Image (cartoon, rainbow, N blue to C red):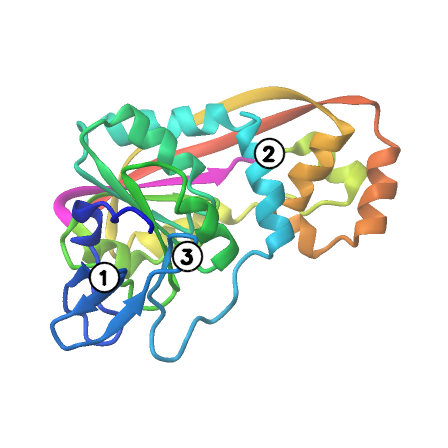
Amino acid sequence: MSPSLPARAVALLACPVCAAGLTEVGGALVCASGHSFDRAKQGHVTLLPPGGARHDGDSAAMVADRAAFLGAGHYAGVTEALAEAVLDAGEPETVLDLGGGTGQHLAGVLDRAPGAVGVVLDASRYAARRAARSHPRAMAVVADSWSRLPVKSASVDRVLVVFAPRNGAETARVLTPHGQLVVVTPAAAHLGELVGPLGMLSVDPDKTTRLADSLEPHLVPLSERRREDVLVLDRAAVATLVGMGPHARHLSLPELADAVSRLPERVPVTVAVDVRTYGRR
């Protein structure tokens, strides 16, 4: 029998049907109206709205690549910068990671915030299966970030969004009055050494404007910092890096294998991200 979910994390959640609070009863999450959501054997819970999700999220192969790449510590600098931004305003008690994938970044934040509990929301059931085991003070939920989040209003101290979609209105709704959103986005130099040789997608030059348009009607920008690291990756790690991201949807496996085979055996790769914090208006 699976261990109970962290009670303080469950207390953040809301029924996706009626928005009432949820409690864990016999391996399921149940609201006062009787809506019940079974916990999967892998440990996660699905709280999709009645119409379902707008998309299925990352595939099993993409999630496996992400788990391998992050598990090797290649994005440890990103996690460190994220955690520093989270702790700037003091240690949170509750953290929500939207589009949090395998839960690696949330786990890194919780390691630095020993009094906090966390919830990973992701559209991919494959990601949620891994996120359910990412940290003893975290739980994983399959949910749609573009719909009403299955989270109580004004309940979360920090919301994290790392390379994932941003729902400004819903983020503002679930944040506590003094809560903050921490967003990590790729900077212009991110993975620049691979864009040309592998035919990868480059960073959208209008990303900053689009970020402001999506968030600032609902949230106030507070701070911004840049984190840059240079990794030295072998060809296998490069293939895993490409396979875990949106580039995987634009390159076939034979195309990727051919392009990677033309790279030097070890390649310097820049990891450059912008970390921004926002508060409620």
CB atoms at circles 3 and 1 under 8 Å apart?
no
Q: Which residue is mark 2?
A: 69
Say if residue 164 shows up in the picture.
no
Q: CA distance from mark 1 to mark 2?
A: 36 Å
> Tag 2, which secondary structure?
helix
Residue 165 in the image: x percent, y percent?
44, 54
> What kind of secondary structure does the magenta stretch mostly adopt?
strand
Label 1: few (<14), some or many (≥20) within 10 Å? few
In percent of width and height, residue 169 lies at 27, 61
| Residue 181 shown in magenta | yes
Q: Secondary structure at mark 1?
A: loop
- Asked whether, in this view, residue 161 is left or right of residue 193, the answer is left
Q: Residue at x 49, y 51 (%)?
A: 127
Specify the segment rendered in magenta.
176-189
Q: Under tag 3, what secondary structure? A: loop
Indicate the quadrant where residue 218 lies: bottom left
Question: Dot 1 corresponds to which residue?
Answer: 26
